[in-house]
Image (cartoon, grey):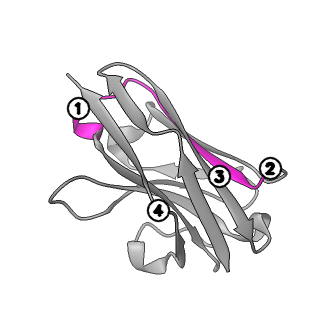
Amino acid sequence: QVQLVESGGGLVQAGGSLRLSCAASGRTFSSVYMGWFRQAPGKEREFVGSISLSGRTTYYVDSMKGRFTISRDNAKNTVYLQMNSLKPEDTAVYYCAANSKGLYYREVRYYDYWGQGTQVTVSS
C-alpha cells in the first residue's frame, strides 16, 4: 500500500508558477513509479508527466514540455511538479499517482494508488 498526499495548489495569475508536492508513505517509495495527472471540470483525467524510480528519466505531454518539471527525492519520499508559465487552460485538479509495476505508463488504469488531488486555478 502507498498513501499519497498532494499539496501546493492554489490560485495564480497567468504566467506565474506553482510547485506541487506529493508526499508518500507506506511501501518503499523508491520502488514505485510516479506520475502526475490532472482533471479539468467536465473532462477526463489526463496524463501530465511521470518520473522513473531513480528520478533519472522523465516524460511529459508535449504541451507541457519546457513549462513543467517533475522531480523526486527518494530520501524524503516526495515527488514534485514545478509548473512555470502557467496558462488558464492549466486550471484543473492535479493528482499524483503511483504504479507498483515500476514501469512507464501514461494511462490512468495502470496506476494503483492516488492522492486526493490539489486544485490549481490560473486566472487570466
Residue 106 in the magenta stretch? The answer is no
Name the residue that disc number 1 marks. 88
Tell me which amino acid carries mark 4.
Gln
Name the residue that disc number 3 marks. 57
Q: Is residue 43 above or below residue 92?
A: below
Q: Badge 2 local density, few (<14 within 10 Å), some, or many (20+)?
A: few
Name the residue that disc number 4 marks. 116
Numbered tag placed on residue 15 in the rendering: none
| Residue stretch rendered in magenta on the structure | 76-90
- Secondary element under disc 4, as helix, strand or loop, is loop
Numbered tag placed on residue 76 in the rendering: 2
- Secondary element under disc 1, as helix, strand or loop, is helix
- Percent x, y for residue 79? 65, 50
Label 1 near label 4: C-beta < 8 Å?
Answer: no
- Percent x, y for residue 53? 72, 62
User: Gap in Å between the C-alphas at discs 4 and 3?
Assistant: 25 Å
Q: Say whether residue 107 is left or right of residue 31.
A: left
